[in-house]
């Protein structure tokens, strides 16, 4: 989106926004008794836009799955509140889409209906003046904290408490952050983003749930909330398996089926668990439901790039830039395309741009860290991976990046300490076992330990690709090629992966199975046309076969009688064999 187009779109949206804000309030459905829409209204009036966005998204999904759950006027309100929250997040195209849906919904209402709740008094207050000053110092977190901290506790609005909580958390001040989030929940018990903030700071799920118990018992249509809190408590403790199961059960047993936020969470959890196939599948489902989806698309782009689907990554990046260039995700996706195209300087620039837009973007930090590492700037890379770990202590890929830096600088001891810490912190699962084994493989003294760890990992998850790759590497060192071939065939029985096909090709070459090795290299290149090692393996085989072919031709020339005929037949056969390969390459 060019700057001129963006300015026009934002101007139009501001007019749209003012139109909806100016409408008079809708009378409560149950006078004297708050319903869930009233809670959304209060949070919108308080300026808790991220909380409004989460709750309105879930409620709209429930409404879609049961059209009788809310009245037409309530559905209209939800759409407007959701659009407002998108507007405040600078997701302008998505906001236009939701405002348009709201106007369509409005047609279903009677002409006498009053259709927009008030968003509160807009007159200038001491708090609003403080907020204006804060806008000027948003990039200076310490100044922002000082300004907000100067407001007496009793005069702090939910919005001020929410901003303080986020700023404290970003600064690593956990105790005051927890206090501020709890204050938000005391004032607005359905502030879901505040709930996520508390869970991310290791507050127990049961304690958080107790703070919402009263509203769950008194407000209809909130029977799903306690399970939702339980699911995200598992997310923030790194229990990916139980988090996945809980969210899946939440989808099946409630009206939250096909909710974009839940699908995005599932995709991210599968990614964390090392299940790339299901992660990509859930991201694709979420995209189909919401073509303006931005959140999580940086991880999706990374997965596509890692699979060698660079054309898809490029298309995704273009689509995201058309939605908004004010978010980190499109920059990260384009950076992944550059990184896997080995344009590390450009990947570094794009990662830095993404961090500038969102300093809490873990994927941007990982991208920049990986680019710095591959450019030989290992110490700078370490800083970025450490910051990623601070922001996402349950994400294994953050630790993997840091450990790779340690190994690249021959700091095996530091790598071993870190891998052991991850193993103890996140538990003994296939991923942590494989990470620890990876470090053990670097030291001849710990080779047997690496073997034991990999066997444990593969017992837990026989299809875990990283464990299979490392076990194959160990078998290659021991020259146990037949065992390696059996391992790789078993792993490829239910999945297809470029690296596994390529390694199987290497093992088949080692046992002189050249034709099948060529087939495996071909499959690997069909999955990732940019896989240089597969291409090198295929070219090496061609060079090794060339002298043999020449010798055979000389022998044929010495033959009497049908020598020319034999030569031609041999040439035709060989030409046909390699023509297929040339045609295949031409198709890439």
Image (cartoon, grey):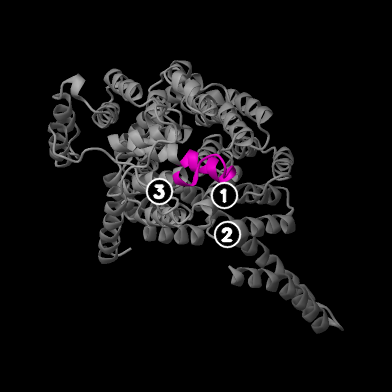
Which sits in the foreground, 512 or 221? 221
Question: How far from the left and from the top, in percent, is residue 2?
Answer: 29, 65
Q: Nearer the viewer, mark 2 or mark 1?
A: 1
- Farthest residue, direction front: 112
Vertical position of residue 425 compared to residue 390: above or below: above
Spot occupied by residue 164 in the image (x, y as percentages of width and height): 24, 28
- Which label's residue is closer to the chain start, 3 or 1? 3
Region in magenta:
57-73
Classify 10 Å Cα crowding around label 2: few (below 14), some (14-19), many (20 and above). some
Task: Mark yes or no: residue 375 visible.
Answer: no
Q: Is residue 334 above or below residue 119?
A: below
Quadrant hosting residue 9? bottom left
Q: Which residue is mark 2?
A: 535
> In the image, 236: left or right of 12?
right
- In this picture, residue 209 sits left or right of residue 504: left
Which residue is identified by label 1? 285
Say few, some or many: other residues with alpha carbon within 10 Å of mark 1 (under 14 / 14 to 19 / 20 or more).
Answer: some
- What distance separates the C-alpha of mark 3 from that of mark 2? 68 Å
Badge 3 marks a residue whose secondary structure is loop
Q: Look at the numbered discs 3 and 2 and tell me whether their residues touch, using CB distance below 8 Å.
A: no
Q: Residue at x 61, y 51 (%)?
A: 498
Q: Magenta includes 61?
A: yes
Name the image quarter holding residue 324. Answer: bottom left
Q: Visible in this render: residue 39?
A: yes
Which mark identifies residue 441? none
Q: Nearer the viewer, residue 459 or 415?
A: 459
Q: Which residue is mark 3?
A: 113
Rendered-image quadrant of the N terminus: bottom left
- Proximity of marks 3 and 1: CB atoms separated by less than 8 Å: no
Classify 365 as above or below 423.
below
């Amino acid at each position: 989106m060019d700057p001129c187009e963006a300015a026009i779109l934002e101007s139009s949206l501001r007019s749209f926004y003012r139109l909806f804000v100016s409408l008079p309030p809708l009378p409560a459905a149950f006078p004297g008794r708050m319903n869930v829409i009233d809670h959304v209204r209060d949070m919108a009036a308080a300026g808790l836009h991220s909380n409004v966005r989460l709750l309105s998204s879930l409620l709209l999904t429930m409404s879609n799955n049961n059209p009788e759950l809310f009245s037409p006027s309530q559905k209209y309100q939800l759409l407007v509140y959701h659009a407002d929250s998108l507007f405040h997040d600078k997701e302008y195209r998505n906001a236009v889409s939701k405002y348009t849906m709201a106007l369509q919904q409005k047609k279903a209402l009677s002409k006498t209906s009053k259709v927009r709740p008030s968003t509160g008094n807009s007159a200038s207050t001491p708090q609003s003046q403080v907020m204006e000053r804060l806008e000027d110092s948003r990039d200076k977190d310490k100044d922002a904290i000082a300004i907000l901290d100067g407001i007496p506790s009793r005069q702090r609005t939910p919005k001020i408490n929410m901003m303080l909580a986020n700023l404290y958390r970003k600064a690593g001040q956990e105790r005051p952050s927890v206090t501020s989030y709890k204050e938000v929940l005391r004032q607005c018990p359905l502030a879901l983003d505040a709930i996520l903030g508390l869970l991310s700071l290791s507050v127990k799920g049961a304690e958080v749930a107790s703070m919402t118990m009263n509203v769950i018992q008194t407000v209809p249509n909130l029977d799903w909330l306690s399970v939702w809190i339980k699911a995200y408590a598992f997310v923030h403790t790194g229990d990916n398996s139980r988090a996945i199961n809980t969210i899946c059960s939440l989808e099946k047993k409630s009206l939250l089926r096909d909710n974009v936020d839940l699908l995005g969470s599932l995709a991210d959890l599968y990614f964390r668990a090392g299940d790339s196939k299901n992660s990509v599948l859930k991201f694709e489902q979420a995209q189909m439901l919401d073509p303006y989806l931005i959140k999580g698309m940086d991880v999706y782009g990374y997965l596509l790039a890692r699979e060698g689907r660079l054309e898809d990554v490029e298309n995704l990046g273009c689509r995201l830039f058309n939605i908004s260039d004010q978010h980190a995700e499109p920059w990260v996706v384009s950076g992944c395309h550059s990184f896997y195209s080995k344009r590390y300087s450009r990947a570094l620039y794009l990662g830095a741009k993404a961090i500038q837009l969102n300093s809490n973007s873990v994927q941007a930090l990982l991208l920049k860290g990986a680019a710095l590492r591959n450019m030989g700037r290992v110490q700078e890379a370490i800083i970025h991976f450490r910051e990623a770990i601070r922001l996402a202590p349950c994400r294994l890929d953050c630790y993997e990046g840091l450990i790779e830096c340690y190994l690249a600088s021959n700091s095996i001891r530091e790598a071993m300490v870190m891998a052991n810490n991850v193993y103890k912190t996140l538990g003994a699962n296939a991923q942590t076992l494989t990470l620890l084994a990876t470090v053990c493989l670097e030291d001849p003294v710990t080779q047997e330990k690496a073997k034991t760890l990999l066997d444990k990992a593969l017992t837990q998850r026989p299809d875990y690709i990283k464990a299979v790759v490392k076990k194959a590497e160990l078998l290659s060192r021991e020259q146990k090629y037949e065992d390696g071939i059996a391992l790789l065939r078993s792993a490829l029985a239910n999945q297809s992966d470029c690296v596994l096909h390529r390694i199987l090709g290497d093992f088949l070459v080692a046992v002189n199975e050249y034709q099948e090795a060529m087939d495996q290299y071909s499959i690997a290149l069909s999955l990732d046309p940019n896989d240089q090692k597969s291409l090198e393996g295929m070219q090496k085989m061609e060079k090794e076969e060339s002298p043999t072919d020449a010798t055979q031709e000389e022998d044929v020339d010495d033959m009497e009688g049908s020598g020319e005929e034999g030569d031609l037949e041999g040439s035709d056969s060989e030409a046909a064999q390699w023509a297929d390969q040339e045609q295949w390459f031409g198709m890439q």
